[in-house]
Amino acid sequence: MQIELSTLNPSQVYFTMTQSLLPRPIAWVLSENEDGGHNLAPFSYFNAVCSAPPLVAVSASPRPDGSPKDTAANIAARRRFVVHIAHRELVEALNESSAGLPPGASEVAHLGLATAPLEGFSLPRLADCRVAFACELERVIELGPGPQSLILGEVNSVYLADEVTSRDGKGRLKVHADRVDPVSRLGPTEYAALGEILTLSRPA
């Protein structure tokens, strides 16, 4: 089967893309509402895109009426946000945070999630997440007729829980993926937990 995306409407394109780009990492994004509360939402159009400067990209679709969703509006207005990598024990809360609460509501408060300070950063992190990226807005690129907001964030610092890291004999940092135990996104209602890790030496 070969699918010509030009023959599909945007919704059909979305479902084709999200069921075939597998697996997708999930950015669990905390941003600050206008009243100082904390919005929280998952995005699986997400990845790292540059190391110098260190940039991550999160793609946020608009509301049905064309207005920006809270995450995009909050980041545009206040510029700082925190990207978390959720693990399997948090997948239900991750999924619940995608519910359509009223604009300005705090998913963090609604779900009863604890936060902890991020040293040197104005926003907190989710206390139970093992990985968090403290980000500052670099730019927003509007794509397509929606428009879709491609949010580029410069990573100021990375929080890593002590239990997911170690040092090798040369003192180099090792982040143990199995200890992070991240979840990823598959189809519309499907998530995946980390499975077998394949270790291969880089070719010379």
Image (cartoon, grey):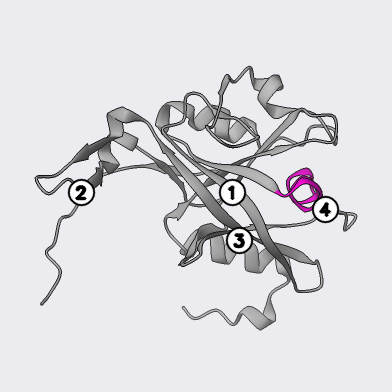
Cα separation, mark 1 vs mark 2, equals 24 Å
Q: Which residue is mark 2?
A: 172
The numbered mark, 3 or 2, whose residue comes first in the sequence reads: 3
Q: Dot 2, how many residues are within 10 Å of its Cα: few (below 14), some (14-19), or many (20+)?
A: few
Q: Nearer the viewer, mark 3 or mark 2?
A: 2
Cα separation, mark 2 vs mark 4, equals 42 Å
Q: Amino acid at mark 1?
A: Cys
The numbered mark, 4 or 1, whose residue comes first in the sequence reads: 4
Q: Which residue is mark 3?
A: 15
**Left or right, 175 with reference to 199:** right
Cα separation, mark 4 vs mark 1, equals 19 Å
Q: Dot 4, how many residues are within 10 Å of its Cα: few (below 14), some (14-19), or many (20+)?
A: some
Q: Amino acid at mark 2?
A: Arg
Cα separation, mark 3 vs mark 1, equals 29 Å
Q: Which sits in the foreground, 123 or 141?
A: 123
Q: Is residue 33 magenta?
A: no
Q: Nearer the viewer, mark 2 or mark 4?
A: 2
Q: Dot 3, how many residues are within 10 Å of its Cα: few (below 14), some (14-19), or many (20+)?
A: few
| Highlighted magenta segment, given as a residue range | 69-79
The numbered mark, 1 or 2, whose residue comes first in the sequence reads: 1
